[in-house]
């Protein structure tokens, strides 16, 4: 199977948060989620053992997924105030944590490997 076909084995709906912060009735400021999500074609796979080292403390291989896609997604960043993209996989909400670009490896299809981690994991 060609690499480009492997990138289209699944479809995920991505939710992207806006940069607008709104005061909620509870008194907390929260970011507004965009009114519309967007779909990406991708391949969803378990996290490889070499990537486990990149996970935040307390997260395990079971709490994460690798998503391979040609789309550009927003990841978690401690330097910006933008929230990471989110999606639902197997009924659980995952947050886009890190990007590993594969555009310099000479493959037939340039793509990105993203690490998604469980959003509401209390660690």
Image: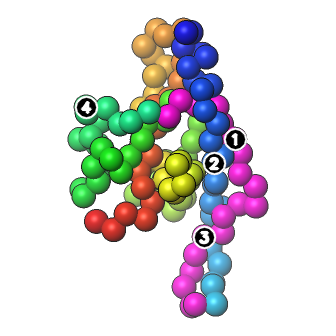
Quarter of the image where the N terminus is located? top right
- Residue ID at (71%, 51%): 37
- Vertical relation: 21 (above or below) 46: below
Residue 99, can we see it? Answer: no
Q: Any mark on residue 50, and which?
A: 4
Q: How would you classify the magenta stretch by its main secondary structure?
A: strand
Of labels 2 and 3, the one closer to you: 2
Q: Earlier in the sequence, mark 2 or mark 3?
A: 2
For residue 49, side relative to residue 31 (left or right) = left
Q: Upstream in the sequence, badge 2 or badge 1?
A: 2
- Magenta residues span 26-44
Residue under numbered circle 1: 39
| Mark whose residue sits in front, 3 or 1 | 1
In the image, 19: left or right of 122? Answer: right
Earlier in the chain: of badge 2 and badge 4, it is 2
Image position of 25 with respect to 34: above or below: below
Q: Which residue is mark 3?
A: 31
Q: Position of residue 109 (x, y in %)?
A: 56, 14
Disc on res. 87: none
C-alpha distance separating marks 3 and 1: 21 Å
Residue bearing mark 2: 14
Asked if disc 2 and disc 1 are in contact, CB closer than 8 Å, the reply is: yes
Quadrant of the rendered image containing residue 104: top left
Res 86 seen here: yes
Q: Pointer 4: residues within 10 angstroms few (<14), some, or many (20+)?
A: few
Between the C-alphas of marks 2 and 4, the distance is 26 Å
């Amino acid at each position: 199977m060609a690499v480009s076909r492997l990138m289209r084995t699944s479809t995920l709906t991505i939710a992207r948060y806006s940069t607008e912060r709104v005061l909620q009735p509870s008194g907390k400021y929260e970011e507004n989620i965009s009114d519309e999500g967007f779909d990406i074609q991708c391949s969803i796979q378990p996290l490889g053992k070499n990537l486990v080292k990149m996970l935040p403390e307390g997260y395990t291989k079971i709490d994460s997924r690798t998503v391979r896609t040609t789309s550009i997604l927003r990841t978690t960043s401690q330097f910006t105030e933008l929230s990471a993209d989110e999606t639902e996989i197997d009924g659980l909400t995952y947050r886009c944590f890190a990007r590993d670009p594969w555009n310099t490896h000479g493959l037939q299809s340039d793509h990105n490997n993203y690490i998604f981690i469980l959003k509401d994991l209390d660690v």
